[in-house]
Image (tube, grey):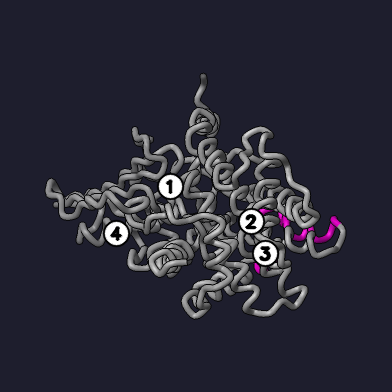
Amino acid sequence: MNTDCYNKYVQILKEELVPAMGCTEPIAIAYGTAYAREVLKEKANRIEVLASGNMIKNTKCVIVPNTGNLVGIEASAIIGLLAGDSSKELEVISVVEEDAIKETAKLLETDFCSVDLLDTTNVLHFIIKLYGENHTCTVEITNAHTHIQKVVLDDEVVYEDNETNKYLGKFTDRSCLNIDDIYEFANTCNLDDVRDLITRQIDCNIAIANEGMTGNYGIGIGQCIFNEYTNDIISKVKAYTAAASEARMSGCCLPVVTNSGSGNQGITCSVPLIIYARNFNYNEEKLLRTLVFSNLTAIHQKTSIGRLSAFCGAVSAACAAGAGFTYLKDGNLTQIKDTITNTLADIPGIVCDGAKATCAAKIATSLDAAIMSHQMAMNNKVYDGRMGILKHDIENTIQSIGRIGKYGMKSTDKEILDIMLDKER
């Protein structure tokens, strides 16, 4: 691997493996209002939020942490305004006083914050407008959860990002990603270049998995899987991973290290491998390299699908975890590619109907498929590239899934949103 490509891979991991508290869409709203408040520099009397359909879909049903179990865009926007620190980005509301929580609940009973659907083709796009006594401030965020596109104070543009050659407006170009080079990078990278990133992911994501297994979140899916299924390592893998997601979606305040802008995806491509590796006493180096491989494989798949879609991200992340199992157990590169092929042949799309506690079940189901696909690949069993959307080349198969998620499911995405908003045909 040449130096330029190597450095890009390190930078991509730095950009994608970031801590976030709570579901990233409502947290992004809180980040936007906190940032706007800091620009406005006076007390805001009213908030307007204009948000894309996908942003609304992913905030409608999820509990916002540090709000006293409040749900939705309005709660996110108000708590960000009252207590947010934008310098913390996706941990913007990690420190919230009780008075701010009470004030948020009180303001939700008024017309202090309004939310409307934004007419946009960009799936991750929202605009925050704050109205003060003397000034107004508008903050527009596009493509990535903390990518500020434009800031307007009164009628003056005080900031605008005109960068056009970066991925999602702020990130390193992802065209260098491919399974062959990801495999080489995972095998040969200097672990000191990525150790802190991966170690933080291990610590954060296992902590919330352990918290989720207390059963005090949602319906307690982790305990259910662990107690009702055969008490083997695969059940444990699914139980802890699902429990981490359920805790996160149900308002747990512990941070998660994300992947591709998603805490659930960060959990899914890391927790199963951590649980398995620790169970069988794999050494630290092997686990770190496995997580490098799994994370980059998840990012590679999501690059062609996009940040938000009607295509459930648990599929891409579980597929990466399945390939990670093959890597961890010293499968060769062909078997790794076959794991990906088998997974995408089995579940080439579970619909995303918004972020919520049931994401945990979709994660467990996706892991079932990915682990079965890994086991098939280790026995040199793989589906033929002429079947369905599969191609003979793994990169073309990944691109096929990207087309389905980004373009093919657009009408599905709209129909899901209409159903969630109770709109009649």
For numbered disc 2, what is the local secondary structure?
helix
Instruction: Give whichever of discs 4 and 2 has the lower sequence position.
Output: 4
| Distance between the alpha carbons at the discs numbered 3 and 2 | 27 Å
Sequence-earlier tag: 4 or 1: 4
Which of 238/33 is in front? 238
- Element type at marker 3? helix
* C-alpha separation, residue under disc 4 versus residue under disc 3: 42 Å
Disc 1/disc 3 C-alpha distance (Å)? 40 Å
**Amino acid type indicated by mark 3:** Tyr
- Which amino acid is tagged 2? Glu
The residue labelled by disc 1 is 73
Q: Which of the two marks, 1 or 3, is nearer to us in this view?
A: 3
Judging by the rendered image, the residue that carries numbered circle 3 is 327
Q: Residue 35 has which mark?
A: 4
Give the magenta part as a residue range: 210-229
Who comes first in sequence, dot 2 or dot 1? 1
Element type where label 4 sits in the image? helix
Q: Amino acid at mark 1?
A: Ile
Tell me the residue that label 2 is attached to: 246
Kindly identify the amino acid type of the residue bearing the numbered disc 4: Tyr
- How far separated are the C-alphas under marks 2 and 1? 19 Å
Do the CB atoms of the residues marked 4 and 2 lie less than 8 Å apart?
no
